[in-house]
Image (cartoon, rainbow, N blue to C red):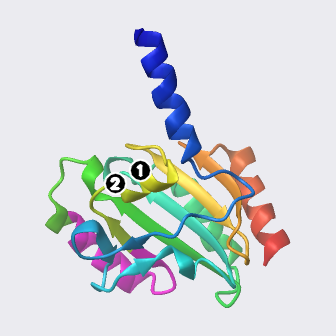
Amino acid sequence: MYKVIISLIIFTTSLFSLSVGESAKPIILSDKDGGRVDGTPWNSQMIKNKVYLIFYVDPDEKDTNNALSEALKEAKFDPQKYASIAIVNLAATWLPNFAIEAKLKAKQKQYPNAIYVKDKTKKLVSEWGLKDDSSDILLFDKQGILIYKYEGKLNNKEIQKVLKLIMENI
């Protein structure tokens, strides 16, 4: 019986998981759910007309994909054609939200072309099936279709794959 219940949970979760080749289910993060660092709502429907790379990160895993961040910085993609979004899973850490939010505001000033977003209720974990307590990488084309998804730390081969996909889609 235990195996049947576990199988049903896994199957049900996979039904709601965002997969490569799909557009993301519309999500709005605002108020109690989170939102942009400046206090305005964030709407996933904005993921169009540019290539968007989303880092969905547990604050305890913030350095997991620094190598990708550095590679993106060096690539100097045209901000008219490419943008990055860092969505921080605030519910995945014991760190106080006010401390994380202060760091995010500083990052937003340091990197004005990036979009910083707070997810206070793990909404993207439940709605898009992203991995909790991790570092998820999602790459969307200009039509808002997911073209790459990775959970955890990218190795150099995966970083090169992401860079190539961005170049092919901008």
Q: In this view, does 9 lie above or below 170?
A: above
Magenta region: 100-116
Question: Could you classify mark 1 by the number of other residues whose Cα lies within 10 Å: few (under 14), some (14-19), or many (20 or more)?
Answer: some
Q: Which residue is farthest top? A: 1
**Residue visible at 51% across and 21% down in the picture:** 7
Quadrant placement of the C terminus: bottom right
The dot on residue 126 is 1
Task: From the viewer's perspective, tell me whether residue 39 is left or right of residue 25.
Answer: left
The dot on residue 122 is 2
Does the CB distance between marks 1 and 2 fall below 8 Å?
yes
Choose top left, top right, bottom left or bottom right for residue 168.
bottom right
Q: Position of residue 26 (x, y in %)?
A: 51, 70
Q: Where is residue 85 in the image (x, y as percent from the top left)?
A: 50, 72
Q: Position of residue 122 (x, y in %)?
A: 34, 54
Residue type, numbered disc 1: Ser
Q: Is 69 or 54 nearer to us in this picture?
A: 54
Residue type, numbered disc 2: Lys
